[in-house]
Image: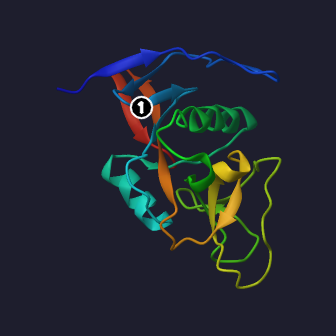
Amino acid sequence: MLYVFCLVFVLVTNIDLIEPSTTTCCKDGWLAYKGSCYMFYDENKVDWMEAVRYCKLHGSEIVVIESRLENIFLKYYARKLFNGKLTKNTTLFWLGASDSDIEGIWKWIVTDEELTYFDPNFMGDKTPDNHKDCLAMPGSYDFDWRDVPCTERLGYAICEIRASTDNNGTQIQIVGR
């Protein structure tokens, strides 16, 4: 039996008050925020392509971060996972962007569009052939974005599903489709 829960999330930080504009309904185990549902896969470390495949297996896509507030929300929950379960200095979460086509030109793989939002502390390495072509949020950098080698089994996936409502109730749509 599939359980769906609705969550209205309010996060108060020293910078912002984050409030979703509407209630978002998500499957059990997923976090709701402003029309999307997120799942932090934290069981086994995987490489970037394995993270992409994991999200697809769960009917979702690897996360696309489109705003500062969404980034703050995801960083907040990434930090919350470090209650002794994961080690911050050796953990990272994969994001759905790559610059493997052209070094320094970052695109979301779900939409094939260039990023319009970047983490303010992003330190992209524009060195040609640096083999760091995938975007991640490493705990060792307090989850600020970094470019990381795609083929190393360093991190965990953050998966995203866009939630939308039609006349029949809640309908789940994959991000970018």
For the N terminus, the quadrant is: top left
Specify whether residue 168 is in view. Answer: no
Please say if 154 is above or below 92. below
Residue 35 versus residue 104 in the image, above or below? above
Q: Nearer the viewer, residue 88 or 176?
A: 88
Extreme residue in the bottom direction: 129
Q: Secondary structure at mark 1?
A: loop
Q: Position of residue 109 (x, y in %)?
A: 55, 61
Q: Please name whichever residue, 118 or 107, is drawn nearer the observer in this view of the structure.
A: 118
* Residue sitting farthest toward the front: 84
| Front in this rendered view, residue 11 or 64 | 11
* Residue found at x 55% / y 37%: 82
Could you tell me how many numbered marks the image carries?
1
Q: Nearer the viewer, residue 137 or 53?
A: 137
State the colouring used for the structure image.
Answer: rainbow
Side of 57 where 102 appears, left or right: right
* Residue 106, position as x, y percentages in the image: 70, 64
Whether residue 132 can be seen here: yes
Q: Position of residue 66 (x, y in %)?
A: 67, 43
Q: What residue is drawn where x is 56% and y is 16%?
A: 22
Residue occupied by mark 1: 30
Crowding near the residue tagged with mark 1, few <14, some 14–19, many ≥20 C-alpha atoms within 10 Å: some
Determine the residue located farthest toward the left in the rendered image: 1
Residue pictured at 82% horizontal, 50% vertical: 121
Q: Which amino acid lies under the numbered mark 1 shown in the image of this protein?
A: Trp
- Whether residue 136 sits left or right of residue 165 in the image: it is right
At x 68%, y 65%, the residue is 147
Whole-percent x, y for residue 132 in the image: 66, 73
